[in-house]
Image: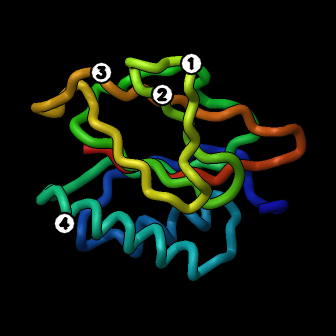
Amino acid sequence: MKSAHVHAWRAVVTLADADARAAQAMKTLSLDCPLLAADIAAVARSFLAQFDASEASLRVEVVTTSTCPKFHCDNTRIRLVTTYHGPGTEYVFAATPGDIHRGPTGALVFLKGHKHPTHSDAVLHRSPMVPLGVKRLCVVLDI
C-alpha cells in the first residue's frame, strides 16, 4: 500500500473480462499483488452471477481522505463495497441515525440503491474518515 497511487480506477466489468479488469486496476494503482487482483476478479464474477447481471460498474480506489462523507443512498440497484485496507464503510439505519455501524475490513457490504424494487431508504452509508498517513483500498461494484 505504501507505493500505491492515490487514484480511483473505473471500468465496466463482465464475467469474461473480470481478470483482465482487475489486473488493469492493479497496474494503474501501482499495486503488485496478484492474489488481490484474483480476489477482486472473483468478487466481481460472484456479484454478477448472484444478481444475474451481464455487466457492472467496477471502481477500485486508493484514497487518503473520506471520498463521500455524508450519509446517503446511491442511484443504483445494488452496490457492493469491500474495503481491503483501512477503515470500512460506515452505515446507519434510518430509524436510529445516531447509531453508526462500520463494515469490517474485508467484509462484503451490500447496499440497496434507489433503483432497487424494494428500496425504502432504510439504510444509508458513507465513506469513513481515513486517519492521517493511512491509505484506504476500496472496491465498489454497482448494477
Q: Position of residue 25 (x, y in %)?
A: 53, 61
Q: The residue tagged with tag 3: helix, strand or loop? A: loop
Q: Position of residue 39 (x, y in %)?
A: 48, 74
Residues packed near mark 4 inside 10 Å, few (<14), some (14 to 19) or many (20 plus) = some
Q: Position of residue 7 (x, y in %)?
A: 65, 45
Q: The residue tagged with tag 4: helix, strand or loop? A: helix
Q: Work out whether mark 1 precedes mark 4 in sequence or the reverse, and give the earlier one.
A: 4
Q: The residue tagged with tag 2: helix, strand or loop? A: strand
- The residue that disc 3 covers is 121
- The residue that disc 4 covers is 49
Report the side of 39 relative to 133 (left or right).
left
Q: CA distance from mark 1 to mark 3?
A: 15 Å
Q: CA distance from mark 2 to mark 1?
A: 7 Å
Q: Work out whether mark 2 precedes mark 1 in sequence or the reverse, and give the earlier one.
A: 2
Report the side of 31 relative to 100 (left or right).
right
Tell me where residue 129 sits by quadrant.
top right
Give the residue drawn at x 31%, y 24%.
122
What amino acid is labelled 2 in the image?
A: Val
Give the residue drawn at x 21%, y 55%.
55
Q: Work out whether mark 3 precedes mark 4 in sequence or the reverse, and give the earlier one.
A: 4
What amino acid is labelled 4 in the image?
A: Ala
Quick check: 49 above or below 89? below
Residues packed near mark 3 inside 10 Å, few (<14), some (14 to 19) or many (20 plus) = some
Quick check: 49 above or below 65? below
* Labels 2 & 1 near each other (Cβ < 8 A): yes
Give the position of the C terminus as an image quadrant.
top left
- The residue that disc 2 covers is 92
Q: CA distance from mark 2 to mark 3?
A: 10 Å
Name the residue nearer the viewer: 123 or 83.
123
